Image (cartoon, rainbow, N blue to C red):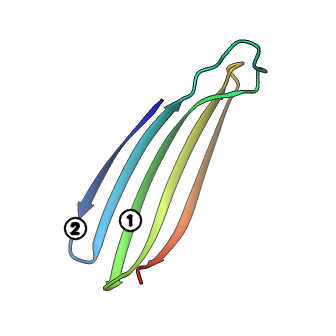
């Protein structure tokens, strides 16, 4: 089971930002090993520039966390460069 929510804000016709947060909980059954994935949290924030119609260029920050059945946790952060062209 999981959920997500997003917010998008346009500063002008060429600039926008969006933020998304999501969580996922898969649960467990008896007999699964301790390193079984049981859930995660995910946050993204992006800034987009639209220089011409159908083309977008952006930068995005991503933060993710996961948890295993044995309560072991991991975190990761990254920055992505994004390019999109709609044909």
Left or right, residue 56 beside residue 33:
left
Q: Which residue is mark 2?
A: 11
Outermost residue, top direction?
A: 30
Mark carried by residue 82: none
x 66%, y 16%: residue: 29
Left or right, residue 4 beside residue 13:
right
Q: CA distance from mark 1 to mark 2?
A: 10 Å
Front-most of residues 53 and 87:
87
| Percent x, y of residue 28 | 64, 19
Outermost residue, left direction?
A: 12
x 34%, y 85%: residue: 51
Front-most of residues 28 and 73:
28
Q: Which type of secondary structure does the marked residue at label 2 adopt? A: loop
Vertical order, 1 against 82 (above or below): above
Give residue 69's quadrant in the image.
top right
x 48%, y 61%: residue: 60
Q: Which type of secondary structure does the marked residue at label 1 adopt? A: strand
| Percent x, y of residue 5 | 34, 42
Q: Earlier in the sequence, mark 1 or mark 2?
A: 2
Vertical order, 2 against 45 (above or below): above
Left or right, residue 78 beside residue 55:
right
Q: Quadrant of the C terminus?
A: bottom left
Mark carried by residue 47: 1
Number of numbered discs visible in the structure rendering: 2
| Percent x, y of residue 79 | 56, 60
Vertical order, 72 against 40 (above or below): above
Left or right, residue 71 beside residue 10:
right
Front-most of residues 9 and 84:
84
Residues tagged 1 and 2 counted as in contact (Cβ below 8 A): no
| Percent x, y of residue 11 | 22, 67
Is the residue marked by circle 2 packed among few (<14), some (14-19), or many (20+) residues within 10 Å? few
């Amino acid at each position: 089971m999981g959920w997500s929510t997003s917010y998008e804000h346009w500063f002008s016709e060429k600039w926008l930002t969006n933020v998304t947060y999501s969580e996922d909980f898969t649960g467990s059954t008896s007999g699964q090993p301790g390193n079984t994935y049981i859930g995660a949290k995910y946050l993204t924030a992006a800034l987009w520039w639209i220089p011409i119609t159908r083309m977008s260029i952006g930068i995005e920050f991503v933060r993710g966390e996961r948890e295993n059945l044995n309560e072991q946790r991991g975190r990761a952060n990254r920055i992505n460069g994004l390019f999109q062209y709609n044909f």
